[in-house]
Image (spheres, rainbow, N blue to C red):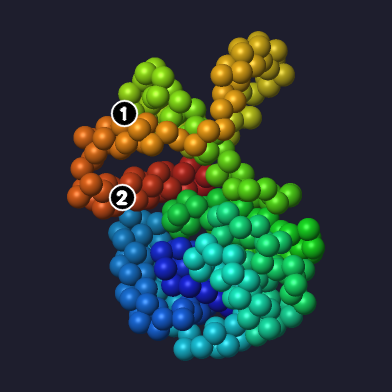
Amino acid sequence: MKIAIIGSGLIGQAWAIVFARGGCDVQLWDGDKLAVQDALKLISRQVQQLENQQLLTDANGVAKRIQAADTLESALDQADYVQENLPERLELKKEIFRTLDQLSGPATILASSTSSIPASAFTEDLPGRHRCLVAHPVNPPYLIPIVELCGAPWTDKSVIDKARDILRAVKQKPVIVHKEIEGFVLNRLQGALLREAFRLVQNGCISVEDLDITVKDGLGLRWSFMGPFETIDLNAPDGLEDYCNRYGAMYQSISREQTSTEAWDPALVAAIEQQRRSLVPKDELLDRRLWRDERLMALMRHKDHADSGE
């Protein structure tokens, strides 16, 4: 299978690794040819790190399956699937999808990594709009496999189904979002938790550090292998309905305090920033991000072993 990756930034690099690791031939294109060469060097280091962490077995082979495309036309030639990763600007999305629709074969799936712009906003006037959709990943997708698939109202269901099959074949975890909604699903869930986290800190209920501990050493431990509905299904003797009957009134009472839609207060953001910098100084953020990725690799290795029954 041939995959075209449009845009060679961090997300484009990560997608290239995902598809090459899955055995696909990947063409990586960017309007800046020097950026592509830099990306290939970074990809080589990233796949070697994955091999060191036992998350793939042939780093050199994976890297070799990713080739720089000299032109957009060559990248798209006979491509089965396209993943676009350009900046989050609507006019830019319109322009690139217009070009992708003109240059790619009629059966090629055209997907965007956008995290905020619905497919309908940049595909409405395209002759091939039926084959366009959003495939929103979490960064980096080679470590976090969830992908949100969301079509426009005119996206053909068979295209979404085929995109899901392609992503499953490269060991991603695609989910289908059935209607266009701002932020899709993952960011809306994350936003709800963030809003309450900011509120709890603002009201003096808990420190920034202890809030993070509550999630990472509490809710997060369960959420690493089960979702919220399964969580409550297992947290009452007779399942989900029993849980709702027991605790529904409590959550309803809490929700009355969770109706604010105001922007985060700048003074609150500054206070949280100060607490975070006391824990991790700004000049140590890169090292902490590398630590995060190593922990994600260890977690993925554990989950892979658990899923395979080892």
Q: What is the crowding at mark 2: few (fewer than 14 residues within 10 Å), some, or many (at least 20)?
A: few
Task: State the residue in front, 277 or 172.
Answer: 277
Q: Kindly report which numbered mark, 1 or 2, lies closer to the viewer in this rendering.
A: 1
Q: Position of residue 145 (x, y in %)?
A: 52, 53
In the image: residue 83, left or right of residue 273: right
Asked if residue 218 shows in the view, the reply is no
Please say if 7 is above or below 230.
below
The CA distance from mark 1 to mark 2 is 17 Å
For label 2, the residue is 289
Secondary structure, mark 2, is: helix
For label 1, the residue is 209
Task: State the residue in front, 172 or 110.
Answer: 110
Q: What is the crowding at mark 1: few (fewer than 14 residues within 10 Å), some, or many (at least 20)?
A: few
Residue sitting at 61 percent across and 76 percent down?
95
Q: State yes or no: discs 1 and 2 in contact (Cβ < 8 Å).
A: no
On-image quarter of the N terminus: bottom right
Q: Position of residue 189 (x, y in %)?
A: 57, 38
Image disc number at residue 59:
none
Residue 45 lies in what quarter of the image?
bottom left
Residue sitting at 73 percent across and 49 percent down?
179
Q: Position of residue 32 (x, y in %)?
A: 41, 81
Please say if 77 is above or below 301.
below
Please say if 246 is above or below 160.
above
Q: Position of residue 243 (x, y in %)?
A: 65, 16
Identity, as a three-letter code, of the amino acid under mark 2: Arg
Secondary structure, mark 1, is: helix
Residue sitting at 26 percent across and 48 percent down?
285
Asked if residue 206 shows in the view, the reply is yes
Residue sitting at 49 percent across and 66 percent down?
87
Identity, as a three-letter code, of the amino acid under mark 1: Glu
Lower sequence index among marks 1 and 2: 1
